[in-house]
Structures are given as structure tokens and as C-alpha cells.
Image: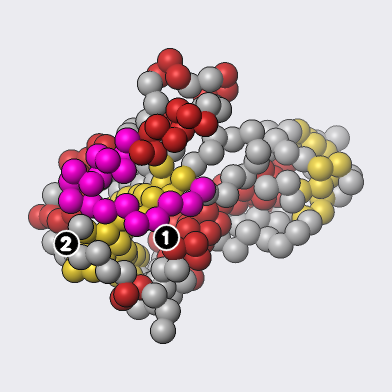
Amino acid sequence: MAKDRVDVILTKRGLAPSRERAKALIMAGQIYVETERIIKPDKVIDDDAAIEIKGSPIPYVSFGGVKLAKALAAFGIDATGKEAMDIGSSTGGFVDCLLKAGAAFVYAIDVGTHQLHESLRKDDRIVVKENVNARYLTFEDVGRTFDIITIDVSFISLKKILPVVTPFMKDGACVISLLKPQFEVGRYEVGKGGIVRDTEKIRRVIDDIKEYGTALGLWPVGEVESPREKEKKNREYFVLWELRESRSLSGFLPA
């Protein structure tokens, strides 16, 4: 009997619009094959195996949308009618979340190519800028400012990205950055499996990033832990910033 990876089969059967979405469902613990819960996307199963999806489906193209939705709710950010820039767009979880939250427009930037989900590529509310290294981004490259800037980058410290964003902030704008301790601590402080488990180290890098941002003229006005696809993954934290001279997020709060 023919066999294949469970994420591939989910996509083939139309149970997930993409392998990325299939992986997100699997890692969220929502996929059952022949009544067995599957937690690894690369698990090989029979092509005709019975598959069941339990729980509410992820409403975004990737789990990143779930993460950002938590941050928007926690910070009380109303994205309705706002213009946004997403740095590190990848598959487009943040982009999708922003649009579903009512954003009028999203400028999607990523260092890679052909990663943004096809459904988003066709959306005329999105400008796709691929093969762009955000750490070297200048205002001339974009030529406009934004109400909301989101950041989700990997294998690089936020210290390489935060200095870039202030020229793109409208008066009263906010930045929502996802802080990943595994890319902020020293290389020898990362534990087995690439996981940072020491809570003191995690707290240290969060405070360090906040201090660094403050020196740039940004003000950390909120912090919340991000949802995780599974418990064994790294803890990540959203930090909400505004320009120090602004100190007002009234334009983002629901009426």
C-alpha cells in the first residue's frame, strides 16, 4: 500500500490548503490518524488512512496568525483601517492576522522568496517585498510610513532590526516585535534541542532588548508571552513599543 508523510496527505486531500498549514494543525495536536493523535508532520502513514481534525481549525495561513492575534488582544490594539508593515512575513501568518483584524493594507517584507501563501499573494491589499534583508532597509526603499509594524525574524537578534523601524512609524504608531530568546542569548546558553529553559536568562534578554529599544527612542509599553504550537518549543514574547515622544496609543484602542 502507498504511504506518504501525514502533512503531504493532508494537503493532497484538501484538508489543509498548504503543507505549512498542515504542519500547524499537526503541531497544534489537532490531527488524528486511525484515532491516534499525530504530533510529527513527517510521520509516514497509509494513503487511505482515516484522518480526523479535532478542535477549531486555525483561521490563518500559519500558526503565526494565532500568535499575533493573542498579542493584538492582549495589548488592546485595534487594527481596523490601519496601514501595517510586517518584517519577516514568511508564510504570512502575521499578514493574514492583520488583514482579518481589519488592517487596510500590509507591506510584507521577507529575506526569502516564494514563501508567502498563494492566497495572500493574490490579495491587492498586500505589497510583497521578497529577497529583502530588513536590517539594511531604508526609508527610500519603501517611501511611506505605517500605523503598525510587526516583526517576526529568526536567526538574528532584534537588535539588528529595531534600529531600522523608527523612520517608518507614523505619529502615534506602534511596533509589535516577537522576541525569541534562543536568538538573543549567547550561543553557549542555548540548551539541548535549541531550547532556552533558564527563566533568568529569558528575563535577562527581555530586559536587555527593552533597554536597547529605549536607547533608540522606542518605549516598551507592553509584554505578553506568545502561544506555542507545542509545549516543547521555545517560549517567545511579544513586546509592544511606541515612540518615546508619543507615549499614546489612543488611535489603536477600540471606541
Q: Label 2 crowding class (10 Å Cα cut-off): few <14, some 14-19, many 20+? A: few
Q: In the figure, 145 relative to 153: above or below?
A: below
Helix, strand or loop status at disc 1: helix
Helix, strand or loop status at disc 2: loop
- Residue 70 horizontal/vertical position (percent): 53, 59
- Residue 234 horizontal/vertical position (percent): 54, 35
Residue type at mark 2 is Glu
Q: In the figure, 216 relative to 44: above or below?
A: below
Image side of residue 43 versus residue 133, left or right: right
Residue type at mark 1 is Val
- Residue 255 horizontal/vertical position (percent): 41, 84
Image side of residue 67 versus residue 127, left or right: right
3D distance between C-alphas at marks 2 and 1:
28 Å
Say which residue label 2 marks. Answer: 245
Residue drawn where x is 55% and y is 28% of the image: 197
Q: Is residue 213 magenta?
A: yes
Q: Which of 125 and 155 is in front in this view?
A: 155
Closer to the chain start, of discs 2 and 1, is 1
Quadrant in which residue 135 is drawn: top left
Say which residue label 1 marks. Answer: 95
Residue at the bottom extreme? 255
Residue drawn where x is 80% and y is 37% of the image: 45
- Write the start and end of the magenta stretch as one range: 208-225
Residue drawn where x is 73% and y is 46% of the image: 29
